[in-house]
Every structure is written in C-alpha cells, then in structure tokens.
Amino acid sequence: MELIVKLFRELTLDELVDIYKLRTAVFVVEQNCPYQEVDEADRVSYHLILKDGDGIEAYARVIPQGVLYEACSIGRIIAVKRRCGLGTRIVDAAIRVAKEKLGADKITIKAQSYACPLYIKFGFKQSSEEFIEDGIPHMLMDLEL
C-alpha cells in the first residue's frame, strides 16, 4: 500500500474527485449528515491517501494552524475497511506530516466520540465536553507533540 501526501494544488483532478466521492459517501451519505463537506480548509491542507490497486483505502487531511483552530489539525479521517489497522496507519501518517511539514507542536481535532479510543492510543486528550454536531456526538481533543 502506497502513502501519497500532497498539497491541494498538487492533487490531480482524478485524485480530487476520488477524495470528494469518498468523503461525501462517508460523511454525508453513510452518516446521513447533509452539510457542506467540501470547505476552504481543503485548499491549504495536506491530503494523505493510502492507496492500493483498488483505490483509496484510507484518507486524512492535515490543516495548518490558524485555519480551524489555533493549533494544527487533522480531520476527515476515513478507513474504507474498518478494524484492520488502516485508521491507525493514516492517523500516524497525519501526525508525522503535521510535525515534519508544518512544524506542529500541538494538534487539535474535533473527534466523533465513537472514534476517541483510536486517538487516545496516540496520546490525544479530551479538551471539551461532548457536544452534538450534525446529529453526531463529538468532542475536542488535543495532542501535545
């Protein structure tokens, strides 16, 4: 499996369409959340793709500090096949990109509550009470690097 790391402007049109199709399928259709999934943060983010012969198997974006939060952020994390280590691989890669490419010393995420155990494994700590966004429980979490 190949890890591809690109800024928005470096993505091919095919890669961009594949990313948006996957994100919409998961975050809008599967989770039944009609919201503006594509946003301006995409333009300044690193996009991480774990890909094999079947296409994208996992995805995440790494957002520079000051765009969504004071700290750097990672988000839109997807593992196509669940419970087989792809989520762990893509989160690990996103943390490395945040440190190496953006010089992050802290990462803030808005995590869906069910996924918090994954982030806790990496050292993220809850930094807000649970709240509902688009009908789904979330919480803010921070990782000091």
Image (cartoon, helix red, strand yellow):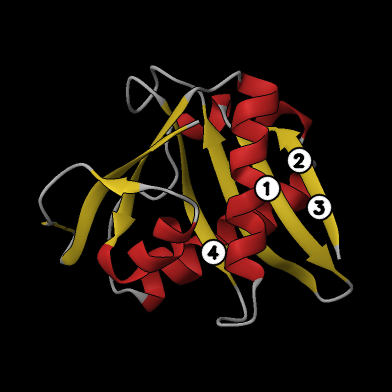
> Between marks 2 and 4, how big is the CA–CA gap?
15 Å
Asked if the residues shown at circle 2 and circle 3 are in contact, with their CB atoms under 8 angstroms apart, the answer is yes
Label 4 belongs to which residue?
Answer: 78
How many other residues sit within 10 Å of disc 2, few (<14), some (14-19) or many (≥20)?
Answer: some
What residue is rendered at 56% in x and 43% in y? 61
Instruction: From the viewer's perspective, tell me whether residue 38 is left or right of residue 4.
Output: left
Q: Amino acid at mark 1?
A: Ala
Drawn side of residue 55 relative to residue 134, left or right: right
Work out whether residue 140 or residue 17 is closer to the camera in this orientation and state it: 140
Alpha carbon separation for disc pair 2 and 3? 7 Å
Residue type pointed to by label 2: Val
Q: Earlier in the sequence, mark 4 or mark 3?
A: 3
Q: Residues within 10 Å of mark 3 (few under 14, many from 20)?
A: some
Distance from label 1 to label 3 (Cα)?
Answer: 8 Å
Q: Which residue is mark 2?
A: 5
Crowding at label 1, few (<14), some or many (≥20) Cα neighbours within 10 Å? some
Circle 4: residue type: Ile
The residue that label 3 is drawn on is 3
Separation of disc 4 and disc 3 at Cα? 14 Å
User: Do callouts 4 and 1 mark residues in contact (Cβ within 8 Å)?
Assistant: no
Which residue carries the number 1 mark?
93
Residue sitting at x 50%, y 23%: 64
In the displayed structure, would residue 122 be above or below residue 1?
Answer: above
**Closer to the eye: label 4 or 1:** 1
Q: Do the CB atoms of the residues marked 1 and 2 lie less than 8 Å apart?
A: yes
- How far is the residue under mark 1 from the one under mark 2? 9 Å
Image check: 28 left or right of 54?
Answer: left
Disc nearer the start of the sequence (1/2): 2
Q: Quadrant of residue 47?
A: top right
Q: Position of residue 85 (x, y in %)?
A: 64, 74
Relative to 64, 50 lies left or right: right
Answer few, some or many: residues within 10 Å of disc 4's Cα (few below 14, many 20 plus, some between 14 and 19).
many
